[in-house]
Amino acid sequence: MATGNLTLNEEKIEVRRRALTSSVAMSIVMVSFAMVFATLMLGYFAYRFTSEVWPPMGMQRVDLGLPTVSTVLILLSSLTYFLSESSFLQKNSKKFKAYFWLTFALGIVFMAVQSWLWFSLKKNGLFVGSGVFASMIYGFTWIHAAHVVGGIVALLCLIPSVRNKREEVSTSLWLKNIGMYWHFLGIVWVIMYFSLFVY
Amino acid sequence: MAFYEQHIHPKPTTFLSKYIFSYDHKVIGKQFLWYGIFFLFVGGLMALMIRWTLAFPGQPFPVIGQFLFPESGGAVPPDTYAMLFTMHGTIMIFYAITPILIGAFGNFCIPLMIGARDMAFPLLNMLSFHIAALSGIILLGSLFTPLGAAAGGWTSYPTLSTLIGSPGVGQTFWSLAIFVLGVSSIMGAVNYITTIITLRAPGMGYFDMPLTIWGLGLTAVLNAIFLPVLGSGVMLLIFDRVFGTTFFLAGAAATTGTGDPILFQHVFWIFGHPEVYILILPAWGIVSDLLSFFARKPAFASRATALSMTAITILSTVVYGHHMFTTQMSPLLTQTFMTLTMTISIPSAIFFANWLGTIWKGSIRFHTPMLFSLGVVFVFGLGGLTGLYLATVTTDLYLHDTYFVVGHFHYTMAASVLLGGFAAVYFWMPKMFGTMLNEFWGKVHFWITMMGLNGVFFGMMLVGYGGMHRRIYNPFIYEFTQKLIPLNTFTTWSAIIMGLSQIIFVVNFVHAVFFKKEKATANPWEVGTLEWTIPSPAPHYNFKDIPVVKCGPHEYGNPNLTDGRDFQYQTEELV
């Protein structure tokens, strides 16, 4: 019995170790990623506030339709991720898996809508090289999309959890850390939606 | 306090797992050291070519000139000159100083000095080195592209760095290399901060950490926050060059709606000013420790030193505008940035006084690491003081873009960090490789380097004060600079002497690493920090039992010590 208790205790310490280490590290990683987008926003507002008319050079505003769809999708995916994580913590494996795959699908659909957005911009005559307004719409959405692709790859790292091939405590940490990144991408998109497209 | 104790990993046995894909922080540190020394050689050679051109314009560079520049008879051609100073700056800052001070000594010292068995994330650590290696290959590859490497200065200001200024693919490679290296450094920074927070030995509070760890930790904080800013900037630059966006391209008439080249300068310096502290903070930390170790006295007001370094770290984030006084900034902003910059003098003066307080009335042992540390005190003092003239708007308008700036930042960044790096190499050599460097040749190396270095950088400041501008292929076509030719020749000879004296170091180093039979003892310098409680070289698991820390890192000359020692280990109760 005594040895059994000791192992249990060691296991607890191990879990605590991984939880603390990963939460410290993920916080720093999030600061780094936030600085990437903060820099882009700094550039955007520098142009936005110094320009007399916006969009400049008589350009058309981007039609809000597709970006709004993207916003709804990415917010929904954050919600389903949250539901997936909480179902896991409530040990509801079925719901966990369903919401996980829904999150994954929403991520893919988000990327599809973004690609559609780029095609439609091009069709409407807003090319990458048509001045700084177009540069920002394209450049910033590219950078965000690249991070979403990274997020989808991160979601793939959860597949062992979905297939019950990972210990419970491990899965809860993976879910928490990847969740931080996934929700972060949602927040960034909402900021970009309101600043680049709506405002 | 450590959050947990790491397991002892089995010893790696194969060549690949031991030397190439090693998870061991000490091996990764050594990998970064060799990487840094290689690039230090490349960057140093470029510096000599630049200096040669300034002293002897049009004359063939000795020995290798004919081979490198056959079309101009061995002399450095004008376009190559621009590439040389660009690549010299880039290589020295990102590929020599960063890997040696942060990559090598960060990796090597952090776990050893805080009593851990390895970094918090060994795999991440290994990837960090391999990504840095990839970045180095991209950068070196750019030298062999059709129009040559980047030539827009290490700052890569648009329009010089856009397709208009640099049509070749070299500039794109440069941007990509910097981006990739940034990723590597951020990975390192995440690892360093997490390690320092979670893996300190039991009993070790933040103020019980050696100041080296303070310096490295603060550097990692700045890296994690500000390298992404540069990453964004160079990524947009790559977009401009490759995909045709116009972030930094002002149209022919700069009508509204086109991009803004000045924006890149803002983004660059928001990163760039913290970057100079990223480079110098580890050296400050190392010197603060070594002065105490070799003066056999507790570090004077070591908490104040640590807190001043922290204050400088914070202030360094809000002063970047002093690099841009001549970009038609509003006078309100220039004055604000000037005042904030001047504020940095206060914490700098505090820890500088602490350094002097540490060595004051100490029983100084003039070993090689101490000589190099005292060298840092001298050159950093000089470099720091000349910074005041550049921070003041009125004097900066005259001095901007002259060799005075070049002299100043070489004193602060290059000279201090180089000497600090050498101090660290001489000091931790026994723990890294198990052998001591030769003391006599170390001292010879120090004195020649020190004289050469002051000749070069003081010469630069003088010609700059005389009005000679930087980045000009042949400044002597202007009448007023012709009087500066003798001074430039002197500077170049100093550079050649300094460059050649590094051969002494290389021979000493290679001999000690590969051929020296005589092994170092566990604690040859009689120092009390944790890494000296274990054998030399450090075993792959570092500490068999995780040490328990009972006193600070600088306990020297305590009159209560009885057993003939004048120091005590951090694992011992304060007597």
Image (spheres, coloured by chain):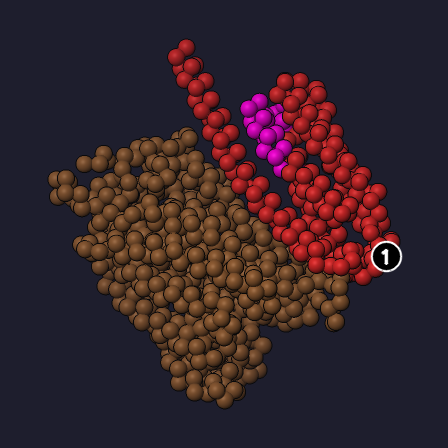
Chain colours: A red, B brown
Q: Which residue has dot 1 on it?
A: A125
Q: Where is residue B370 in the image (x, y as percent from the top left)?
A: 27, 58
Q: Which chain carries label 1?
A: A
The image quarter in which residue B465 lies = bottom left
Res B530 visible: yes
- Asked whether B55 or B132 is in front, the reply is B55
Q: Position of residue A115 (x, y in %)?
A: 79, 46
The image quarter in which residue B502 lies = bottom left
- Asked whether B17 or B571 is in front, the reply is B571
Q: Give the range drawn in magenta.
A: A160-182
- Asked whether A87 or A36 is in front, the reply is A36
Q: Position of residue B312 (x, y in %)?
A: 43, 52
Reply above or below: B429 against B475.
above
Q: Is mark 1 on a helix, strand or loop?
A: loop
Quadrant where the C terminus of chain B lies? top left
Residue furthest right in the image: A124
Residue B394 shown left or right of residue B502 in the figure: right
- Residue A172 among those drawn in magenta: yes
Residue furthest top in the image: A1
Reply above or below: B291 against B143.
above
Residue B65 shown left or right of residue B417 in the figure: right
Res B166 visible: no
Quadrant where the N terminus of chain B lies? top left
Q: Where is residue B252 in the image (x, y as percent from the top left)?
A: 74, 72
Identity of the amino acid at label 1? Gly
